[in-house]
Amino acid sequence: MNRHLLSMNDLDRQDILAILGTAESMHDVQRREVKKLPTLRGRTVVNMF
């Protein structure tokens, strides 16, 4: 899902379930002692404005 979320009315059931599933995964990460995700291991993250 690579689009802007402007309203919940724009989402179908699958989109909502995907968002809730991702939120549940992130919640599990926040409950761990080490709150890091292995997804970006070995990479550099840069925020440019």
Image (cartoon, rainbow, N blue to C red):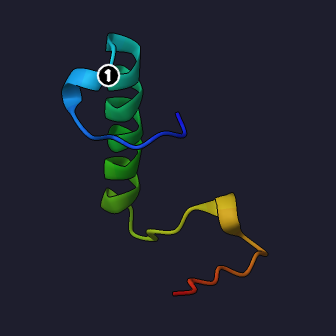
Q: Compared with residue 44, is residue 25 higher up or lower down, i.e. above or below?
A: above
- State the image quarter where residue 22 is shown: top left
Residue sitting at 31 percent across and 32 percent down? 20
Q: Position of residue 18 (x, y in %)?
A: 42, 27
Q: Compared with residue 28, is residue 49 higher up or lower down, i.e. above or below?
A: below
The image shows a total of numbered marks equal to 1
Q: SS at mark 1?
A: loop
Q: Quick one: which residue is furthest to the top in this view?
A: 13
Residue sitting at 31 percent across and 50 percent down? 27
In the picture, measured across the screen, residue 48 lies left or right of residue 22, that is: right
- Would you name the residue on which mark 1 appears? 11
Q: Compared with residue 26, is residue 12 higher up or lower down, i.e. above or below?
A: above
- State the image quarter where residue 47 is shown: bottom right
In the picture, measured across the screen, residue 24 lies left or right of residue 49, that is: left
Q: Position of residue 17 (x, y in %)?
A: 35, 21
Residue sitting at 67 percent across and 58 percent down? 39
In the picture, measured across the screen, residue 41 lies left or right of residue 48, that is: right
Q: Quick one: which residue is furthest to the right in this view?
A: 42
Residue sitting at 39 percent across and 22 percent down? 15
Observer-nearest residue: 39 or 8? 8
Q: Compared with residue 16, is residue 26 higher up or lower down, i.e. above or below?
A: below
- State the image quarter where residue 12 is shown: top left
Type of amino acid at the residue the image marks with label 1: Leu
Label 1 packing within 10 angstroms: few (<14), some (14-19), many (20+): few
In the picture, measured across the screen, residue 32 lies left or right of residue 6, that is: right
